[in-house]
C-alpha cells in the first residue's frame, strides 16, 4: 500500500480545546500556551473562533489573542467564523485563513446555526465575496460528517451534495469532522474515497474526535485514501458545545507519535508538544485525554528488571 511520507497537522487546542472548558482561560495564559504551540513546529494553528461572545464566552478575547501572540511567517493562523460579522472581526485581527462552520445534517445545523444545512450554505455567499476583497483564505468544514448524534449515519450522497456546493462557492479546502467520534475506518475509506473520486480538485482534511477510541484508526484510514491534512488538539482537550457528550479531539501527541512510528513525518517536535500537554494536564486534568501522557513514547524504554541486564 502506498502511504504518504509526510502529513500536515493543524493544532486546534486554542479553539476546540479552550472553548470546551467550563471556565475561560485568562487571555495572558492563552497567549503563552499558543506561543509554546507555535514553538513546536506546527505549520497551521486554529487560534480561535470569531463567534458572538455570548455564544462562547471562553473565546470572547479572540482579537486580543490573535493580535498579541508571537507570530511566525511560516505558521498560518486559522479561525472559525460563523457569519459576516465574525469574518469582519477575523480580517481585522489579521488571521491568514478562516474556516466556515457547517453541519452535515439539518438537525445538527438547526441546533448549531438555527437554520438547515443548505440555508446555511446560501448564507456563505456574502462571506466568500467579502473574503475575496481581503488577503484571507477561506476553507470549509462539514461537522458530524461521519455520524450525527441526532440523525445517525450521514448518507454519502448528502456529503457529495455539500461538497459540490462548496466548490460552486469557490472553496476547495474542506475539513471533514467526526465531531462526536462516530466514524469507523471502513466508513472513512468509503466516504472519503467517494468524495475524492467525484471531486479530485477538493483538498480534504480530517478533524477527528476520540470519543469512542476510533480516532487514530480513522486517521490511518484517511491516509490510505490520500488524506494528508489532520487536525488534533494538544492533551486531547476539546469538545463541541453543540454536540451532547462530545469528548476531546485526538491528542496531538498521540497522533504525531503514531504517525512518526509509522515512518510518516510531521515536522513537529514531539517532546515540545508533550511538554505543552503536561502543563495543560496539570491545569485542566478532568478535560484532557492522552495516551502518551499516561504511557510515554515507545522510545522511553524502561529499566529492565534485575537479573535481565545481560539479555541485551
Ligand atoms: Zn472538534
Image (cartoon, rainbow, N blue to C red):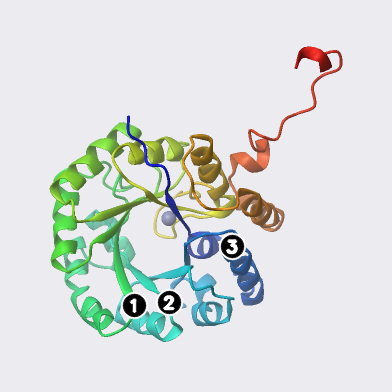
Q: Which residue corresponds to mark 1? A: 136
Q: Identify the residue position indicated by label 3 in the image.
A: 37
Q: CA distance from mark 3 to mark 1?
A: 22 Å
Q: Which residue is mark 2?
A: 95
Q: Quadrant of the N terminus?
A: top left
Q: Residue at x 41, y 86 (%)?
A: 92
Question: Is disc 2's CB within 8 Å of ligand 1?
Answer: no
**Near-viewer residue (157 or 229):** 229
Q: Is residue 25 visible?
A: no
**Image point (30%, 43%), residue name:** 226
Measuring from the top left, give residue 131's x and y in whole percent.
28, 80
Please tell me which residue lies in front, 113 or 68: 68
Q: Locate residue 252 relative to residue 310 in the image: left or right.
A: left
Element under label 1? Answer: loop
Q: Residue visible at 64% across and 53% down?
A: 277
For marks 2 and 3, the one nearer the N-term is 3
| Distance between the alpha carbons at the discs numbered 1 and 2 | 7 Å
Amino acid at each position: 500500500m502506498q502511504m504518504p511520507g509526510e502529513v500536515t497537522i493543524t493544532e486546534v487546542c486554542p479553539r476546540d480545546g479552550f472553548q470546551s472548558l467550563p471556565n475561560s482561560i485568562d487571555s495572558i495564559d492563552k497567549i503563552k500556551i499558543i506561543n509554546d504551540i507555535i514553538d513546536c513546529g506546527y505549520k497551521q494553528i486554529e487560534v480561535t473562533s470569531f463567534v458572538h461572545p455570548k455564544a462562547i464566552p471562553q473565546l470572547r478575547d479572540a482579537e486580543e489573542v490573535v493580535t498579541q501572540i508571537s507570530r511566525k511567517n511560516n505558521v498560518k493562523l486559522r479561525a472559525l467564523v460563523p457569519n459576516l460579522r465574525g469574518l469582519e472581526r477575523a480580517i481585522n485581527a489579521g488571521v491568514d485563513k478562516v474556516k466556515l462552520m457547517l453541519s452535515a445534517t439539518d438537525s445538527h445545523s438547526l441546533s448549531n446555526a438555527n437554520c438547515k444545512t443548505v440555508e446555511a450554505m446560501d448564507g456563505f455567499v456574502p462571506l466568500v465575496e467579502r473574503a475575496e476583497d481581503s488577503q484571507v483564505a477561506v476553507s470549509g468544514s462539514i461537522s458530524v460528517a461521519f455520524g450525527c448524534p441526532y440523525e445517525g449515519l450521514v448518507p454519502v450522497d448528502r456529503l457529495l451534495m455539500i461538497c459540490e456546493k462548496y466548490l460552486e462557492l469557490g472553496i476547495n479546502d474542506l475539513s471533514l469532522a467526526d465531531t462526536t467520534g462516530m466514524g469507523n475506518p471502513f466508513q472513512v475509506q468509503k466516504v472519503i474515497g467517494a468524495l475524492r473520486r467525484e471531486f479530485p480538485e477538493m483538498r480534504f482534511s480530517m478533524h477527528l474526535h476520540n470519543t469512542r477510541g476510533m480516532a487514530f484508526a480513522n486517521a490511518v484510514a484517511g491516509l490510505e485514501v490520500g488524506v494528508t491534512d489532520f487536525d488534533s488538539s494538544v492533551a486531547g482537550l476539546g469538545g463541541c458545545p453543540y454536540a451532547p457528550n462530545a469528548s476531546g479531539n485526538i491528542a496531538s501527541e498521540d497522533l504525531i507519535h503514531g504517525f512518526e512510528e509509522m515512518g510518516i513525518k510531521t515536522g513537529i517536535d514531539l517532546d515540545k508538544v508533550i511538554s505543552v500537554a503536561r502543563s495543560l494536564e496539570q491545569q485542566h486534568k478532568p478535560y484532557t485525554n492522552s495516551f502518551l501522557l499516561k504511557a510515554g513514547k515507545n522510545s522511553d524504554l524502561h529499566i529492565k528488571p534485575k537479573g535481565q541486564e545481560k539479555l541485551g
